[in-house]
Image (cartoon, rainbow, N blue to C red):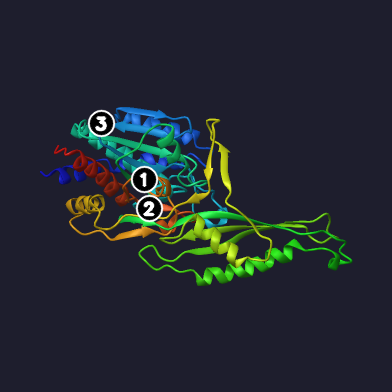
Amino acid sequence: MSLAKKILKLAEKYRDYTAENLSNLVKIRSLSKQEKDVNLKLKWQMQKAGFDEARIDGLGNTIGRIGNGGKILAIDAHIDTVAVGNPANWNFDPFSGEIREGFVHGRGTVDQKGGAASFVTAGRILKELGFKDGLTVYFTGTVMEEDCDGLCWKYLIEEEKIRPDYAISTEPTNMNVYRGQRGRMELEIYFRGVSAHGSAPERGKNAIYLASKACLEIEKLNNNLKGGDFLGKGSVTVSEFVSGSPSLCAVADFAKIHLDRRLAWGENKDSVIAELRKALEGLGAEIVVPYYEETAYTGLVYGMEKYYPTWKIEENHPYIQKGVEVYRDLFHSDPLIDKWTFSTNGVVINGVYGIPLLGFGPGNEELAHAPNEKVPIDDLVKASAFYALIACKLAGFEG
């Protein structure tokens, strides 16, 4: 029996095990900065699966390890989730973890606890096969991604000194191979006016009017943004408008708008700020890229600038082609090679540090952050097999 068939058979054997592990993760609420309990559960699952090591670092990431090779593969799943939103939009309890009709149901099943449950099973398969040499595999259940993409990996690389030679993001890809995403950045733009009594507004300078003119210019800018390669064009939108004045009977002397800017290939922080300065010339706009600095559940204060670079890997890159080879060996067809519409930890793993990264994850990304989130158990099985086989191939392990 080929190694691919052997691994796929084991992944199917552990089908219920994988689904139950995911169900147990989903039952634990884990908003950003509140991941302690779910990460302790993930660490326990790694230990029960026989991982060589399972620990939690200073930021709160759960780190599992199998193997002792000189090369490093990291398989990443962020373990925090977004909130439920309006409960009335859900047809089931978001934290039930219910297993029925071939799906595991609940918040985080797609984004992204399904990836974590799958890589726990992949680790169990590797241990059962006797995998130990040729490659070190780290399995990372990372924190705070929903608040600040890639912050967890900045910590892993800079503080834990884990710098992989290859990485896999288990963000949902609908079981296709992904190789990039648009970047993004957040911007705050401040406008300073001069207050005056509301009965004589001509004596002041209204910051709301300045900001409103800026909003219209930003709408025009969005319509005129270029870019049309594999990743698509950039975008910009106003996501928040805040103002202030000495009273409701006075001219506003302060306004702030917050922008969500998605970055096409070739766009970067400097080019975005330059185009905004040009578009908002004469409005007194003060443009700031905010800095995220928050306290993790461990008590550690850590942060980074809210600029998340665009990244992509060419389709003919040997690592992407290795992923295609693994897919063919397991499933006897060619994967769709595509990209995410949203942002991932890849902004730091590849966008900042240039580490070869491919995406392969259970679930449909359209259900990420949406009500009635659920993941097919078939996807969990296939993802478990994919992670185990690619580790074997990178290690030169033949079972």
Q: How many labels does the image show?
A: 3
Whether residue 364 is visible here, answered yes or no, is no
- Which of labels 1 and 3 is toward the front? 3
Kindly identify which residue carries mark 2: 172
3D distance between C-alphas at marks 2 and 1? 8 Å
Q: Is residue 345 above or below residue 51?
A: below
Whether residue 279 is visible here, answered yes or no, is yes
Q: Is residue 38 left or right of residue 280?
A: left
3D distance between C-alphas at marks 1 and 3? 20 Å
Q: Based on the displayed image, in which of its 4 quarters is residue 63 positioned? A: top left
At horizontal 54% and vertical 61% (from top left) the residue drawn is: 274
- Cβ–Cβ below 8 Å for labels 2 and 1? yes
At horizontal 85% and vertical 61% (from top left) the residue drawn is: 196
Crowding at label 3, few (<14), some or many (≥20) Cα neighbours within 10 Å? many
Q: Is residue 375 above or below residue 45?
A: below
N-terminal label among 2 and 1: 1
Across and down, in percent, residue 58 comes to 47, 30
Kindly identify which residue carries mark 3: 67
- Which of labels 2 and 3 is toward the front? 3
Q: Of helix, strand and loop, which one carries label 1?
A: helix
Crowding at label 1, few (<14), some or many (≥20) Cα neighbours within 10 Å? many
- Cβ–Cβ below 8 Å for labels 1 and 3? no
Q: Of helix, strand and loop, which one carries label 3?
A: loop
Kindly identify which residue carries mark 1: 115
Residue kind at label 2, given as amino acid type: Pro
At horizontal 68% and vertical 64% (from top left) the residue drawn is: 283
N-terminal label among 2 and 3: 3
